[in-house]
Image: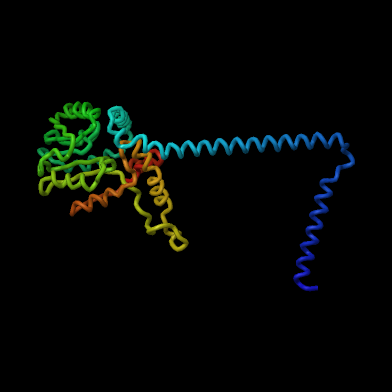
Amino acid sequence: FSEMSFCYGFSHFLNSIKRANIMNELKPRRCCSRKAIVPMCNQNNEADTEKDEGRRIFIASSLTTIATIGSLYFALPQILGPATRAQGWYKERFANAMQDMGEYEAGVSGIKRELLSLIAPGDRVVELGPGLGPNLSYLPAEVSYTAVEPNPFMRRVLLERAAARGLAAAVADDLADLPAGSADVVVSTLVLCSVADQDAVLREVLRVLTPGGRFLFVEHVAARAAAAPGYPTPYNAGRFEWGRFAYRIAQRAVAPLQVALADGCHPDRDTLGAVRGVFGEVYDKRFDVPYVWGGGDWWNMFPIGPH
């Protein structure tokens, strides 16, 4: 017979064996009476019912969790929009939250000390958004210090710490209030992530700086693009940096929540690109927290790890 009929006949033979085995398994054994078989069937039905009920509960709870997270994801940015974030209760809450940055400040202290050592005694220093004043300890006592801090709940602590350092600090609400060429150094740490218009603020920095002045900044940024540009494909999978790519995507995903909860902080900005677009000569050093101080739990600082 032909090869085709052999294949069909062999499969038919196997199916016949399977059917015979199934019928043999379903056939009641002589050692079991009808009364013994019925309770076993009932027990099996009850077990199946319990499994189905467990599946329904699991699916329902999962869908509820997903719906809750989805609602918060879309609702919070609307509830905590710019108008809400400008209110006093929100500013006070954010000022209190900034007191919990001790681990971060201790970790980046070496980098800040090295960067701010470029400030010389007698320099006119303007700091953008100094908050509670974590950078005051790195400044020489002889500088002329002006803080551009719009949050009134941070100003009190800032002025107290400045006085303890022997700094005569002035406070301004906006960088636009300062005259052109009035600063030798402008300092910004974790500020450009939250301004409404980076380009406008950077041009104000350039205006305020005296010719030859310096802009010193430490800012968290979007994770660098993977070494293989674009998206993973079969052609670049071997050299594609999956971790960096995933971190960057995650930053974009949580950005609306980060903006709402952290007073406008955008974790996915290309701040270095913005600085280079305004200043002709830029020296930069990239690092990641918490790895810069030897920490290994990257999620503790997500989504603001890349700097």
Q: Position of residue 133 (x, y in %)?
A: 23, 32
Tell me which residue sits at (36%, 54%) in the image. 225
201 above or below 152? below
Q: Is residue 96 left or right of residue 125?
A: right
- Name the quadrant containing residue 115: top left
Q: Identify the residue at the far bottom of this view.
A: 2
Tell me which residue sits at (62%, 38%) in the image. 55
Q: Is residue 48 left or right of residue 251?
A: right
- Name the quadrant containing residue 187: top left
Q: Is residue 212 left or right of residue 18?
A: left
Q: Position of residue 45 (x, y in %)?
A: 74, 37
Q: How many marks do you count on the picture? A: 0
Nearer to the camera, 286 or 79? 79
Q: Is residue 62 left or right of residue 107?
A: right
Q: Position of residue 92 (x, y in %)?
A: 29, 28
Tell me which residue sits at (70%, 38%) in the image. 48
Q: Position of residue 71 (x, y in %)?
A: 45, 37
42 above or below 115? above
